[in-house]
Amino acid sequence: MHTTTEGPVTEANVLEPASGGKTVEVQLEAKPTDWEISPGHVVAGYGFNGQVPGPTIEGEVGDLLVVLLTNRLSQPTTIHWHGLRVPADMDGTEMTQHPVESGQTFEYRFRLPDAGTFWYHPHLHETEQMERGMYGAVVVRGPAEPQLDRERVLIFDDLKLDHRGNIARFGGLMQRAKGRLGNVRLVNGMFMPQFGMSAGQIERWRVLNASSSRYVHLSIGGRPFTILGTDGGLIPKPMTVSDAVLAVADRLDLAVGPFAVGETLAVDSLAYDRGDMVKEEGGRCATVHVGSALPSRAVIPPTLRHIDPLATGDVMPNRTVALGVKMSLRHGVDWTIDGEAHHHGEPVRVGELQVWDVVNDTAMDHPFHLHGFFFQVLDVNGRPPVTISWEDTINVPKKGRVRIAWLPDDRPGSWMYHCHILEHAAAGMMAHFEVVR
Ligand code: C2O
Ligand code: CU
């Protein structure tokens, strides 16, 4: 059962939908937004269409997505399509387009090549624009999705408020060093939301971590739940766990339930140790109340998808990506890749297998993100992962190493990889490179 177009995405593909596909048109207006994080508590957000999160964009594999972005902020912005295999000039970075200035519009236009849970966010002034709420989900469905009783998108975030309850000042040495850790946890833009679920049913939760720097160590009332998919769509076989870590920018597709009438489940983030300087405490994110029963028609097949391995564990790496840090007189610290802030990496050639060792020389975890292409994790600190999967973001443990493999399909242009802790990317843990023919 394939839910991915495994073939290349060519530039001709962006002009119209695949045969049988449709065109999905979306207008996104970036503008200052009164963001009500809990009843009566409004903060000065930036939303898409006046809401946080922005609208969920939904489509099917093969559809053409056309998004008209209008910028009504007083600062420039762009949209990056995180995880979507778009053509380079649609990637929304400062390498591939001019910033969309205040009052201007820009049209993004590309085919949806893969099923999965993706997201969109600015790629300019991210530390402020994303903290103020500029993010939303992109849900792409394939021809063979597991049938569950109901589906939800849950976007985790946190927000740093000052003592008056306003969004705290941006910047400073601590935020640059640790990333901006909030003091209020949010799900779907709300502080401690409560929601209902029908007893006896199994739901699909598409979970995404949109925080600036906080990891989500998810627990659902301490009960088992089942992982169906990761960043790049379904995994081969469902995997039942009792908790799961979402590094910044990570996604998981879960099957949750069934529960019994009258149960209350705490959706928590458990403690997580990101390293020397950042031991994140646990806390409540949301609460689920289980109401009266409804019949279930959920079927989770034992096999969800087939994924061919790109490489075996003993293949030699052809690039080392060193995540590092150095002291800076001006800034306290600079975060680096291969020893320099804002590194320019070597080009890669279309069709040539890439095996990269991402080595973390620091005492803190970093979520490594590759734009525009999925990779497979071959090992983490020498140990193969529990399942093969397609990823675009992977946690690189402190003083650890992750070996990944990816195959550049025919989408030449400027791409990047970086730490997704937004303050680290801004402070240099970021590299640009070209994919060439
Ligand atoms: Cu969601 Cu350059 O990242
Ligand atoms: Cu980092």
Image: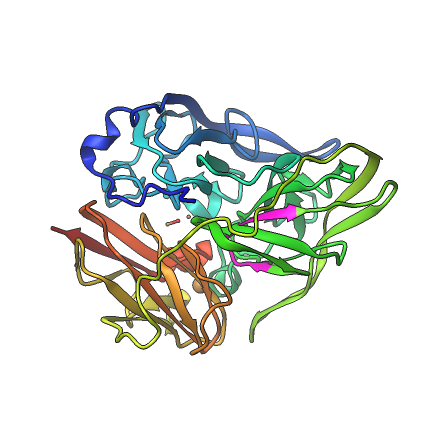
Is residue 238 shown above or below 80?
Answer: below
Can residue 322 be seen at all in this image of the molecule? no
Secondary structure mostly seen in the magenta stretch = strand
> Could you say where residue 311 lies in the image, as x and y percent from the top left?
30, 66
For image coordinates 44% across by 29% down, the residue present is: 59
Quick one: 347 or 257, which is closer to the camera? Answer: 257
**Image quarter in which the N terminus is found:** top left
User: Magenta part of the protein: which range?
Assistant: 245-255
Horizontally, is 240 left or right of 68 in the view? right
| Front in this rendered view, residue 324 or 365 | 365
Residue 223 shows in the view: yes
Task: Point out residue 119 in the picture as x, y percentages from the top left corner.
Answer: 46, 41
Please indicate whether residue 178 sits to the left or right of residue 320 in the image: right
Q: Nearer the viewer, residue 394 or 22?
A: 22
Asked if residue 255 lies left or right of residue 117, the reply is right
Q: Name the residue rendered at 20%, 38% in the picture.
A: 10
